[in-house]
Amino acid sequence: MKHGKKYVDGAKLVDRSNLYDSAEALELAIKTATAKFDETIEVHVRLGVDSRHADQQVRGAVVLPNGTGKDVRVAVFAKGDLAKAAEEAGADVVGDADLVTKIQGGWMDFDVAIASPDMMGFVGRLGKVLGPRGLMPSPKAGTVTMDVAKAVAEAKAGKIEYRLDKSNIIHCPIGKASFGAEKLLENFNALLDAVIKAKPAAAKGQYIKSCAVASTMGPGVRINPSKVGTGVEAE
C-alpha cells in the first residue's frame, strides 16, 4: 500500500518495534494527526477470546468522561409518556411504528438507536438493516430501556458501544486530536477499564493480546497490553 507524504512523515515518529505506555502513545497519535480536519483518535484492542462462542462474547457500553467530540444524532422508538421524555431529553427523532416504516424506506440519519422494551416487537423488523451497522438497540448496551431519557442523555454525552468483530478485535473512537493527551487518556482508560471488567469467565490465558491507537489518517501506535486501564489486571 502506498501512503501519502504526511503519513510517511508521521510514521517516522513511531518506533514500530516499541510498546509505548498509554500516555506516550496518545501523544504520538496526536502528533501524527496532521490532516486539515480534526482527526478522530481510535483504539484497536485484540482480545484473547473466540467470538464464535457465545460464552466468550465481549460487548457493552461506556460513557467517555470527555465525550467523543461528535454531535450524536439519537433516534428513539417509544410512545406515550416515554416518547415525550425522550423528546425532552434531546432526542433528534422519536417515533414508534411510523419510525420503523421511515427506516425501512431508507432513512438512516442517526448515530444511535434507543428503544423502550415494548417497542422491540416493531424494532425487530429492522434487524437486517440496523444489525450490520451496529445500530440495533440492545439491553446489554443500555439502549433497550424504560429510562429512555437517561439513555438519550448518555448518548449525547459521549456513550459508546464496544463489541468484538469477527477477528476478536474491538474498534472504538475515544475523541478528537484537539482534545489533547490528558482528556484522551481519561477516555482511553474508561474504555479499557470497561473492556477488562467485561472479561468472560470462559476466557483463558492473556486477555488483552494487543492494543494500538491511531488518528484517522495516521499510523498505528502500539501500546504495552499489560499496562492498560487504571488498576484492573489486563492478564
Image (cartoon, rainbow, N blue to C red):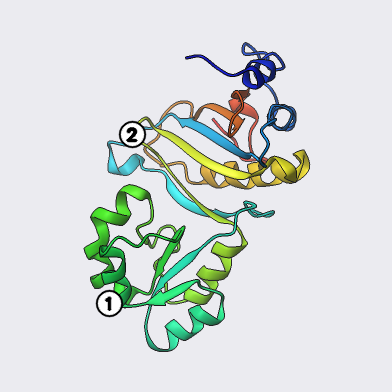
Query: In the depicted view, which residue is nearer to us: 106 or 61?
Result: 106
Q: In this view, does 216 lie to the left or right of 121?
A: right
Whole-percent x, y for residue 82 in the image:
43, 83
What is the residue that sits farthest to the bottom in this orientation?
81
Q: In this view, does 133 lie to the left or right of 150?
A: left
Give the amino acid type for the residue marked by disc 1 in the picture: Ala
Residue drawn at x 59%, y 35% is 233
Q: Is the Cβ of the residue at disc 2 closer than 8 Å to that at disc 1? A: no
Label 2 to label 1, Cα distance in Å?
Answer: 32 Å
Vertical arrangement, residue 25 with respect to residue 198, above or below: above
Number of other residues with Cα within 10 Å of mark 2, as a class: few under 14, some 14 to 19, many 20 or more? few
Instruction: Identify the disc placed on residue 166.
Output: 2
Give the amino acid type for the residue marked by disc 2 in the picture: Lys
Whole-percent x, y for residue 172 in the image:
52, 42
Residue drawn at x 55%, y 47% is 194
Q: How many labels does the image show?
A: 2
Whole-percent x, y for residue 199 in the image:
46, 41
Q: Is residue 122 left or right of residue 229?
A: left
Quarter of the image that includes the C terminus: top right
Closer to the N terminus: mark 2 or mark 1?
1
Residue drawn at x 22%, y 64% is 125
Asked which secondary structure carries label 2, the reply is loop
Vertical arrangement, residue 4 with respect to residue 228, above or below: above
Q: Which residue is tagged 1?
A: 97
